[in-house]
Structures are given as C-alpha cells and as structure tokens.
Amino acid sequence: MSVLSTHNLIIDVPGRESGTPLNITIEPGQRWGVLGPNGAGKTTLLHTLAGLHAPRSGEVKLSGQSLSQLRRRYVAQRLGLVFQDRQDGFPATVLETALIGRHPYLSPWQMEGADDYTRAEAALERLDVSHLRDRLVSTLSGGERQRVAIATVMTQAPAVWLADEPTNHLDLHHQSAVMALMAEQAAEGQAVVMCLHDLNLAARWCDHILLLYPSGEACWGPRDSMLVPSALERLYRQQLTVVEVDGASVFVPKVGK
Ligand SMILES: Nc1ncnc2c1ncn2[C@@H]1O[C@H](COP(=O)(O)OP(=O)(O)OP(=O)(O)O)[C@@H](O)[C@H]1O
C-alpha cells in the first residue's frame, strides 16, 4: 500500500491559474526526485505533502487516510521535513536540536529518555556532526547546520522523508554522504521525496521523478522515462549535452545556449 498519495491535487501557487492534477502514489522504499526551475512550486508541493500548506484542490493521503483528518502528532511521527530555509534563532545546541526529532513521541512535559539520546547521538555521528554536539546551532556554518537539520529528521525516524534540497550548502563529500543516507533510508523501507536542483544527483540517486513546470504542468514516473533530454531542456529552458559515465547519464549545460 502507498505510504503517501495525492488525489487530483492542485497545489496553491499564488497567481497560478491551474495545473496538472497530481495523482502520485509513493510506496515505501521509493526515492522520488522533484525537479523544476526556480518558482515552479517544488517547495509548495513539499509543504502541501506535509500538510503545512492547504491545497488549491484535491487531497493528500498518508497511509490511505486524508492528511487533513489526521492528528498532527501522528503526522509528525510519520513525516519528516528537511526545510530549505530554517530559522535557527532559538538558542539550542546541536544535541538539543537533534532531540527535537523525538518530540512527536513524547507527551508535553515528558523528558527525553536514554533511547532518545541514543538515537540523537547516532544520527549526529552519521551526519558527521557529533563533534559539534555542544555548540549552539546559531554558530555553525551553512553546511554544518544543514547536516544537523538532516540528523534531526533522522532522529525523528519518519516513514516518509520530505527533503527540500537536502544537499544545499554541502560540499561534494557530504552531498554524496547525504544521498547515500537517503538511499539507505529507502532500503530500510522509508519513502524519500527530495526537491533537487542537481539533475545528476537525481539521475544517480532517485528511482522516480516528478517534473514540475512553472505553468503548473507536471509529469511523473520511473526515472529513465522522465530524464529525457528534450523534456529536461524544455523544463529548464536550457540546452544540455548528455554523456555516459559509469553507465549513468550525466547532464551538462551547453555553454551560451
Ligand atoms: N507568500 C507568497 N506570496 C506570493 N507568492 C508566493 C508566496 N509563496 C510562494 N510564492 C510564489 O510561488 C511560487 C512557487 O514557490 P516555491 O517556493 O514553491 O518554488 P520552488 O520551485 O521551490 O522554487 P526554488 O527552486 O526557487 O526554491 C514562486 O513564484 C513564489 O514566488
């Protein structure tokens, strides 16, 4: 059964007349990449899937139940969001921030227990930020903060990851490490939905792709049927050269075209 599905969903992008109704079924273990140019509505879609943004029409279902009918606490246990822009103004250390991932499981005044600490510490270790555990998040670099945000969702252990540009601010090594983590999460049975600007990360790490056009038009399906140069050139209004590296397609923008 699908873990997350959309039913004639039209996302609410201001000023946009309509769009292709989205009827997407996301299964456990799948890795979806959402691709589109700036302003196409990728973040809006992710927030709509998370129940943070009301759809223009249609609905989102989590494990077959309408998201709008579910208790927020249940939704917060099942859906983990890596936001594109975070307000880390609240003065918290790295470890305290990761522990926020356990809040959906705790009652209002319940303190985190040993198991919560074990999970948070393991996630910080996995994201290569355990040496920063006592630092205030506000003092971290952009890439360090991004890794703490991902560690927080890992601590949350959701059934579905909704990650908005998870490789933002990350150096090449950490980009690969984060994409490997997403693949690992999917292999364990979680579903992963990521907005990505890097076509080549999508080609390498996603098995399903959604192309979102600024008009609201959209198409989706298995990766190889979606990553077709002509469709991508129309999506980005950018001509591309495609080369094969290690058996995978690599997309390179043509200079000046
Ligand atoms: N509060 C708002 N008021 C007016 N327009 C908005 C508002 N929020 C979003 N938009 C517009 O909705 C459109 C979709 O925004 P969204 O952030 O979903 O795009 P995106 O595909 O994630 O873009 P990017 O690749 O730049 O992150 C954009 O044109 C944006 O300016």
Image: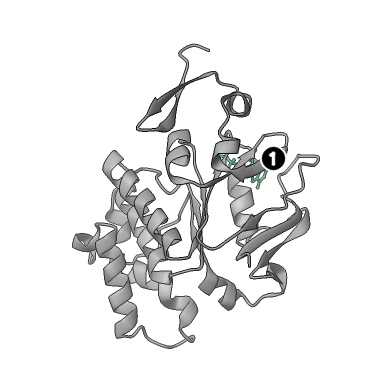
Residue at 25%, 58% in the rendered image = 129
| Quarter of the image with the N terminus in it | bottom right
User: Looking at the image, which residue is at 43% across and 70% down?
Assistant: 157
Ligand 1 quarter of the rendering: top right
Q: Which residue is mark 1?
A: 218
Residue occupying the point 33% across, 85% down: 113
Q: Is residue 214 left or right of residue 146?
A: right
Any part of residue 135 in sight? no
Residue 132 sits in quarter: bottom left
Residue 236 image offset from top left, x and y in percent: 58, 27
Q: Is residue 224 above or below residue 251?
A: below
Q: Position of residue 196 (x, y in %)?
A: 49, 42
Question: Residue 165 location in percent, x, y?
Answer: 47, 46
Q: Which residue sits furthest top?
A: 256
171 vs 180: above or below? above
Q: Nearer the viewer, residue 39 or 115?
A: 115
Badge 1: residue crowd in 10 Å (few <14, some 14–19, many ≥20): some
Amino acid residing under circle 1:
Ala
Residue 153 is at least partly visible in this image: yes
Could you say which is closer to the camera, residue 240 or residue 48?
A: 240
Q: Secondary structure at mark 1?
A: strand
Q: Which x, y percent locates residue 180? A: 35, 51
Q: Is residue 74 left or right of residue 105?
A: right
- The residue shown at (68%, 53%) is 24
